[in-house]
Image: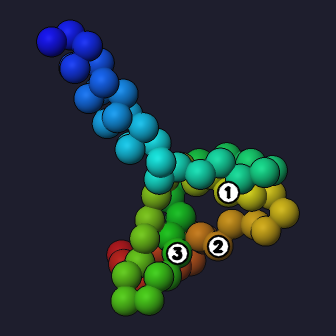
Amino acid sequence: MKRIIKIIGTLLITAALAGCSIPKNPKLTFGKKCVDKGENIVYSYVWLYDKESGLEANETTCEKID
């Protein structure tokens, strides 16, 4: 029984981390920033992005939802 719980736990953690992709040249930034994704505006206080391509999100886009 404990083995089954371990397997299920491992699968859940793996599935949760599958959506997190770490870029080749990672950079971490803090502070509320927003990005326009079609009809939706996505915001976060922590952003992980690639240094070379830059961060799409910015503070001025957040004014659309305030």
The CA distance from mark 3 to mark 2 is 6 Å
Residue 58: image location, x then y, percent: 60, 71
Say whether residue 61 is left or right of residue 1: right
Image depth: mark 1 or mark 3 in front = 1
Q: Secondary structure at mark 3?
A: strand
Image quarter of the N terminus = top left
> What residue is disc 1 on?
49
Between residues 37 and 45, which one lies in front from this camera angle? 37
Residue 45: image location, x then y, percent: 49, 52
Q: Residue at x 26, y 29 (%)?
A: 8
Q: Residue at x 46, y 58 (%)?
A: 44
> What residue is disc 3 on?
35
Residue 37: image location, x then y, percent: 47, 82
- Most distant residue in the top direction: 2
Say whether residue 35 is left or right of residue 11: right
Q: Amino acid at mark 2?
A: Glu
Q: Secondary structure at mark 1?
A: strand
The CA distance from mark 1 to mark 2 is 9 Å
Image quarter of the C terminus = bottom left
Q: Are marks 1 and 2 in contact (CB under 8 Å)?
A: yes
Say whether residue 57 is left or right of residue 54: left
The CA distance from mark 1 to mark 3 is 13 Å
Q: Amino acid at mark 3?
A: Val
Q: Amino acid at mark 1?
A: Tyr
Relative to residue 43, is residue 22 depicted above or below? above
The answer to whether residue 63 of the structure is visible from this angle is no
Of the numbered discs 3 and 2, the one sitting upstream in the chain is 3
Give the number of the disc on residue 7. none
Q: Are marks 3 and 2 in contact (CB under 8 Å)?
A: yes
> What residue is disc 2 on?
56
Of the numbered discs 1 and 2, the one sitting upstream in the chain is 1
